[in-house]
Image (spheres, rainbow, N blue to C red):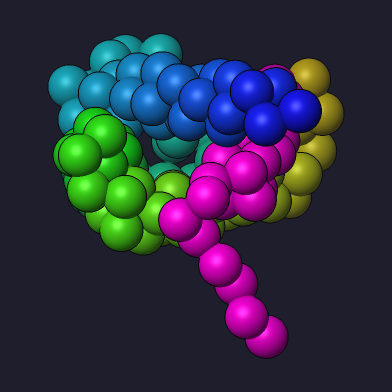
Amino acid sequence: MKKIKSVAHWIAYGYLIYVMGYASLFKVFQKQSMMENMSNFGFGKVWTLFIGYSELLGVIGLIVGFWLHQVKNLSTIWLFFFAIGALMVHFAHNDYKHFYEALYCCIACVTALTLDKNFRLIL
């Protein structure tokens, strides 16, 4: 059971690096399709770049997190807010076809934090 939890944790962690990594780089390097989609959602160039650099910061934190688990957990929480925001923006614009990556990122964040042996949430 412990091995299954570990595998699920690392799959969720890898998924976050992959999806948030390419999404942030598409925004930072201003890929045409990403800029058009962000514009359709009401985000101008400045906000798109701000979001892209912020997501890139979180992805860099996830990569640094291979060695420092505190940075990994902080970066996962940081990116969780962006995933929730992306999900809400898709829903607010009645985009019920292309919201899945944002939803899966939300699930991956919760999974990665829940299954991390170095993370505790005390309420």
Q: Position of residue 38 (x, y in %)?
A: 45, 34
Q: Position of residue 4 (x, y in %)?
A: 70, 22
User: Outermost residue toward the bottom?
Assistant: 123
In the figure, is residue 30 to the left or right of 102? left
- Quarter of the image with the C terminus in it: bottom right
Which residue sits at x=58%, y=28%?
Answer: 6
Residue 27 seen by the camera = no
Is 50 located above or below residue 96 in the figure?
A: below
Which residue sits at x=44%, y=36%?
Answer: 39
In this orientation, which residue lies closer to the viewer: 106 or 122?
122
Task: Inspect the magenta stretch and tell me whether residue 103 lies in it.
Answer: yes
Image quarter of residue 27: top left
The magenta-colored residue range is 98-123
Is 63 located above or below residue 49 in the figure?
A: above
In this orientation, which residue lies closer to the viewer: 81 or 30?
81
In this orientation, which residue lies closer to the viewer: 30 or 57?
57
Which residue sits at x=62%, y=35%?
Answer: 108
In the figure, is residue 110 to the left or right of 73? right
In this orientation, which residue lies closer to the viewer: 47 or 17?
17
Which residue sits at x=57%, y=41%?
Answer: 112
Residue 71 seen by the camera = yes
Task: Inspect the magenta stretch and tell me whether residue 87 lies in it.
Answer: no
Image quarter of residue 8: top right
In the figure, is residue 9 to the left or right of 49? right
User: Outermost residue toward the front?
Assistant: 2
Q: Position of residue 73 (x, y in %)?
A: 40, 54
- Quarter of the image with the N terminus in it: top right
